[in-house]
Image (tube, rainbow, N blue to C red):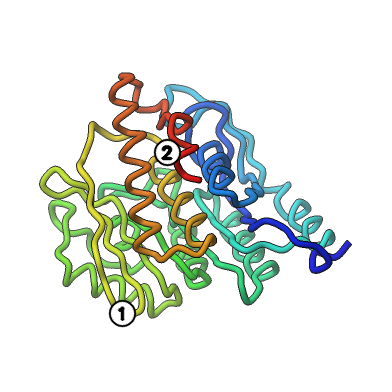
Amino acid sequence: MKETTFKRQKRMALINDLTGFGRCSLAVMLPIVSAMKVQACPVPTALLSVHTGFSSHYIYDCTHLMMPYIDNWEENGLEFDGICTGFFGSAEQIDIAGEFIKRFRRDNTLVIIDPVMGDHGRLYSSYTKEMCREMRKLVSLADVLTPNLTEVCELLDIPYPKGGAAGDAALYEMAQRLAHEGAAKIVITGMETAGRINNFVFEGGQCDSVSSPKIGGERSGTGDAFAAVVAADLINGATLKSAVKKAAAFVNKTVAYAEELNLPWNYGLPIEEYLTELR
């Protein structure tokens, strides 16, 4: 049956790894997107027992499964209102994600790319120069980008600013350059200044900032939760600033609850407590 013959919910493809414990990647994105009344359709890049922030982990690379998997989706005539990408384990996976976008993108499909490459001025140890080159190609396909400052600097091939901070004028110039590559909407995420977390919002040549108090230390999965809320809210018709506000508030609440529970940082965010508030 062709999908044009019946009504359906909004639907988003999520290309990311699936981690059994630790609340990150697909394990965070699937429930958040679903809670926001968007059908969440995973494309797993890898299966992990726990994420790499634990002392040991088991990983199964799904690269060889990805093309047959998406070939079958195409054969079944599936369509998506959104496509959202996260962490990749190889240049080949990034290339496959680009192929997925080219095959499944329609006029009304929103492509959200979270270029998960590094943080605090350093790339992740698994990230190679080849992967960086492929990611620069992939972000040119985005409608929405949600990089942190480290990833912005890597994508633009510019030095990471001393102290890990940049003023609005510098951020505006960076966002303009990224927008020139293709993305109409950009959020530079997670910048810490004077005890607050700031997100720089850029759209249509205009900029704004969404800020919230810094609570506790680093926690796994915060970027995945943030990107998932932004992506689903945009698909549901929200403005970019409104989506960023909703994402920042959700992450802030879950971090505060994690602190209250005294959870280890690698247990991630206790999102279950607040999922119903996203509806």
Which amino acid is tagged 2?
Gly
Query: Looking at the image, is mark 1 or mark 2 nearer the viewer?
Result: 1
Residue drawn 85% across and 65% down? Answer: 2
Q: Is residue 187 left or right of residue 134?
A: left
Q: Residue furthest left?
A: 194
Residue drawn 33% across and 27% down? Answer: 257
Compare residues 216 and 57 and report the one nearer the observer.
Answer: 216
Name the element at disc 2: loop
Are the residues at dot 1 and dot 2 in contact (C-beta closer than 8 Å)?
Answer: no
Reading the image, the residue beneath label 1 is: 205
Q: Quadrant of residue 239?
A: bottom left
Residue drawn 73% across and 47% down? Answer: 65
Name the element at disc 1: loop
On screen, residue 207 above or below 30: below
Mark 2 Cα shell of 10 Å, populated few (<14), some (14-19), many (≥20): many
- Residue 59 x, y percent position in the rendering: 59, 32
Mark 1 Cα shell of 10 Å, populated few (<14), some (14-19), many (≥20): few
Which amino acid is tagged 1?
Gly
Question: Which sits earlier in the primary sequence, circle 1 or circle 2?
Answer: 1
On screen, residue 69 above or below 276: below
Q: Residue furthest top?
A: 262
Q: Is residue 140 left or right of residue 172?
A: right
- Residue 3 x, y percent position in the rendering: 80, 64
- Residue 109 x, y percent position in the rendering: 60, 69
Q: Quadrant of residue 261?
A: top left
Q: Which mark is residue 237?
A: none
Compare residues 211 and 28 and report the one nearer the observer.
Answer: 211
Residue drawn 17% across and 67% down? Answer: 168
For the N terminus, the image quarter is bottom right
On screen, residue 240 above or below 224: below
Reading the image, the residue beneath label 2 is: 221
Q: Give the spatial CA distance, label 1 vs label 2.
A: 30 Å
